[in-house]
Image (cartoon, rainbow, N blue to C red):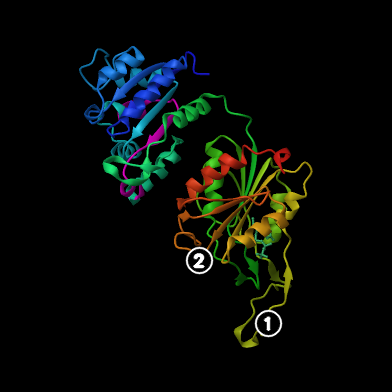
Amino acid sequence: MLTGRRLLLAVTGGVAAYKSAFLARRLVEGGAEVKVMLTESALEFVGPQTYAAITGSQPHVALFGEDMVSPHTELARWCELAVVAPATAATLGKLSAGISDNLVVSTLLATKAPVLIAPAMHTEMWEHPATRRNMETLRGYGYIVVGPETGALAGGDEGIGRMSEPEAILEAIETALTPSGPSLRVLVTAGGTREPVDPVRYLGNRSSGKMGHAVADEAARRGHMVTLVTTSALPTHPAVKVVAVETAEEMLQAVEGTPADVAVMAAAVADFRPTTSGAEKIPRSQGLESIPLSPTPDILASVVARQPRPVVVGFAAETGDVERAVEKAKRKDVDLLVYNDVTEPGSGFGTDTNRVVVIDAGGGTEQWPLMTKSEVAAKLLDRALGMRVSDRP
Ligand code: CTP
């Protein structure tokens, strides 16, 4: 897998730089041709000779004054994959803003090769809004992100921010170098349906559509064929086919017309709609004591019933405990159910973050930490796209 592959390893200034020497060694042992770039601050943690001895070639440090005429463009064109490990907060910030004031950032901006980053920093820095925003931007550029993990940090601290172990990074490198599998047909529903009472008013809910849009965008970035059936006007990745709908009935029609290998049903579909909605606005003077309601179609059930059956991911925004959602996953017969408690801070409607529990078809639960909706989307797709319906218990 690694034999003869041209890998560029960028090491930036964090204590995890010592682990990157081990990574370089594993890559070389695997048969890869490895070139290394070090930032000035990386030199505070590791010496160039370490990497020279491991890789057999002198690491590159400077943008100017080296043997090469234009080191950043030469390295950028040479590599098949660039790996930044560790990636410090400073480098992530410069990369996301395009500030190419050193060899590492200049080369990464100049390359057309995929870029994999393994962030490492203190918890407070990782959780700072600036870093979160930078990560969001870098994911948007299509960068592959590995870690960070929770564990021991520099100076005896503990928390999230520890660079992933070399073995985990190695695995991600191998995956990135593996020709990607077939492009899948991914169907996503998003937003809250609006059921008309009259031409002016509707019954609706507070779903913003952010979670479903994040899933659609991430699937498109991975090269899949994505159809997003949504009530939300949020912007989307240019490759996403958007079908705009308002009501549950329209959403059902759009979903029924869309073939899918994987269906991610993130929409908050109204369970009931006004039985009648006239062409005329109901005047206030007329009064309205009650609105007769009829049930809406269960869109998810129609997808679950398809033959052949796609992998189906449902969502459950609840206010109760997870047991209700585990029961719902069984009742709805989904492959995965993403449960979140909308009353929890950071998990409600319209937020950019979510804290979810993912329930599988066997009733197994996995609590994920508070993450941005893009991060949840990426992790969810890692699981759902790798599933086969035949894997069901
Ligand atoms: N869903 C759907 N069509 C509906 C209702 C729900 O496709 N008419 C999907 C949602 O997109 C979500 C999942 O089903 O993925 C669960 O939605 P939820 O509203 O929690 O399910 P309900 O069956 O309405 O459950 P409850 O009894 O809690 O209202």
User: First in sequence: mark 2 or mark 1?
Assistant: 1
x 65%, y 73%: residue? 198
| Kind of residue sitting beneath label 2 | Thr
Q: Residue 377: percent from the left, percent from the top?
A: 53, 46
Q: Residue 201: percent from the left, percent from the top?
A: 60, 72
Q: How far apart in space, not on screen, are marks 2 and 1 (Cα)?
A: 29 Å
Crowding near the residue tagged with mark 1, few <14, some 14–19, many ≥20 C-alpha atoms within 10 Å: few
Residue 10 in the magenta stretch? The answer is: no
Q: Nearer the viewer, mark 2 or mark 1?
A: 2
- Residue 41: in sight, yes or no? yes
x 43%, y 21%: residue? 26
Q: Residue 288: percent from the left, percent from the top?
A: 65, 84
x 73%, y 38%: residue? 390
> Can you say whether 92 is above or below 130 in the image?
above
Residue 125 in the magenta stretch? The answer is: yes
The residue tagged 1 is 290
Does the beta carbon at disc 1 come under 8 Å from ligand 1? no
Classify residue 60 by image quadrant.
top left
Q: Give the position of the C terminus as an image quadrant.
A: top right
Q: Looking at the rendered structure, which numbered label has been put on residue 343?
A: 2
Tell me the element at label 1.
Answer: loop
Please provide the residue range marked out in magenta: 105-127
Q: Nearer the viewer, residue 243 or 348?
A: 348
